[in-house]
Image: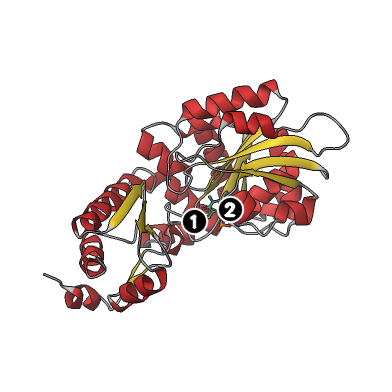
């Protein structure tokens, strides 16, 4: 039995599974924003930004943090702080830092990427990393940095893997950056603490604007020398904001109230994948993402849209503005695709 009519009637709103970036700040988050104490953050005088930076660094077990407008700028500031002109970073072929950031490291820093294929579990193979490190010879770029991603396509990478990458990086005099846009999804899925990952990294970037539900912002954490260098790059990149405490307050609210609840997103994504499979569709779930395979993308997107469900491709993302009824509705609509 379908109930599209009833679901669509809920203020006529579509269920939006395009990304966890589409979440809107809750009433409680907006209250926190309204009452935030603020100052000029470029002068280091915004108490709410300062609190967000230090709380986030503490969570990750790192010395300092830097509030930045976006995850893209966070990764770019990290690359510019770790690498100079003619240096190289190793990253996944489909990593955000390589594929989805407009080549920023090359554009602004003269930094060369060395992409490697992600393994099925979202890791980079250690032997492949090792083989990609260039010898110290003036024919080659200097391989300075390994960039990891967690979660990677929704897959949670275990701290034990980070320990192995750390060992390799130390042996070869390299640094490790983690693009942890969705690190808290890995934290919750694996039942670990953020510092279990942070302890093996020189720098970690986390997004507040994805599953954590803040309207904007990322925090880049690392050692105090690194963060000082990144702060300079943030200004150069035009990311120095002024009374940014109104945004930082949303981030602090998210860190306090929206981490543990990511488990609800994972549970709902699992229910969604199981429901789709019961309808005869092929669906894989990793944390808050469901990958719906084997269909013609354009007609799938159009069909779902007609049923009041927005998707942009095979990746359907569950987030804090999706509830149990929404999941049932999505399964009902998708059933006709089988
Ligand atoms: C979204 C995302 C980013 C970038 O964040 P923006 O705030 O959209 O610039 C970086 N890395 C990963 C893995 C992401 O999913």
Kindly identify the residue that appears in the image at 59 percent across and 32 percent down: 62
Whether residues under marks 2 and 1 lie with C-beta atoms below 8 angstroms apart, the answer is yes
Horizontal relation, residue 121 to residue 269: left or right: right
Say the numbered circle drawn on residue 209. Answer: 1
Say the numbered circle drawn on residue 222. Answer: none
Horizontal relation, residue 327 to residue 188: left or right: left
Q: Residues within 10 Å of mark 2 (few under 14, many from 20)?
A: many
Residue 45 seen anywhere in this rendered image of the structure: no
- Secondary structure type for disc 2: helix
Residue 306 lies, in percent from the top left, at: 30, 79
Horizontal relation, residue 293 to residue 210: left or right: left
Kindly identify the residue that appears in the image at 57 percent across and 55 percent down: 245
Residue 294 lies, in percent from the top left, at: 35, 60
Kindly identify the residue that appears in the image at 67 percent across and 23 percent down: 170
> Residue tagged by mark 2?
71
Mark before the other along the chain sequence, 2 or 1: 2
Place residue 312 in its image quadrant: bottom left
Residue 307 lies, in percent from the top left, at: 27, 75
Place residue 243 in its image quadrant: bottom right
Q: Is mark 1 within 8 Å of ligand 1?
A: yes
């Amino acid at each position: 039995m379908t109930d599209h009519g009833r679901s669509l009637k809920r203020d006529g709103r579509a269920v939006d599974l395009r990304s966890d970036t589409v979440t809107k700040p809750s009433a409680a988050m907006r209250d926190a924003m309204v009452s935030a104490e603020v100052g000029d953050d470029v002068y280091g005088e915004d108490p709410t930004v300062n609190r967000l930076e230090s709380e986030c660094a503490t969570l990750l077990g790192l010395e300092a943090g830097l509030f930045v407008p976006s995850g893209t700028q966070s990764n770019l500031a990290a690359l510019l702080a770790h690498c100079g002109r003619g240096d190289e970073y190793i990253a996944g072929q489909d990593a955000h830092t390589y594929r989805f950031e407009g080549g920023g490291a090359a554009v602004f820093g003269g930094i060369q990427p060395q992409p490697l294929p992600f393994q099925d579990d979202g890791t980079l193979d250690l032997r492949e990393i090792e083989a990609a490190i260039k010898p110290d010879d003036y024919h080659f770029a200097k391989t300075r940095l390994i960039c990891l991603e967690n979660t990677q396509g929704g897959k949670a990478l275990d701290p034990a893997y980070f320990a192995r990458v750390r060992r390799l990086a130390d042996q070869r005099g390299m640094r490790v950056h983690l693009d942890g846009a969705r690190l808290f999804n890995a934290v919750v899925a694996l039942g670990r603490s953020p510092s279990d990952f942070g302890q093996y990294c020189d720098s970690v970037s986390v997004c507040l604007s994805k599953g954590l539900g803040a309207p904007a912002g990322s925090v880049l954490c690392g050692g105090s020398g690194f963060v000082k260098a990144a702060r300079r790059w943030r200004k150069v990149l035009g990311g120095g904001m002024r009374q940014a405490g109104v945004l930082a307050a949303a981030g602090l609210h998210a860190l306090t109230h929206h981490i543990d609840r990511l488990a609800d997103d994972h549970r709902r994504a699992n229910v969604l994948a199981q429901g789709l499979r019961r309808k005869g569709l092929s669906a894989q779930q990793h944390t808050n993402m469901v990958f719906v395979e084997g269909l013609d993308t354009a007609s799938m997107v159009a069909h779902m849209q007609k049923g009041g469900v927005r998707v942009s491709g095979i990746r359907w993302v569950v987030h804090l503005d999706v509830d149990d009824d929404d999941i049932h509705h999505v399964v009902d609509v998708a059933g006709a695709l089988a």
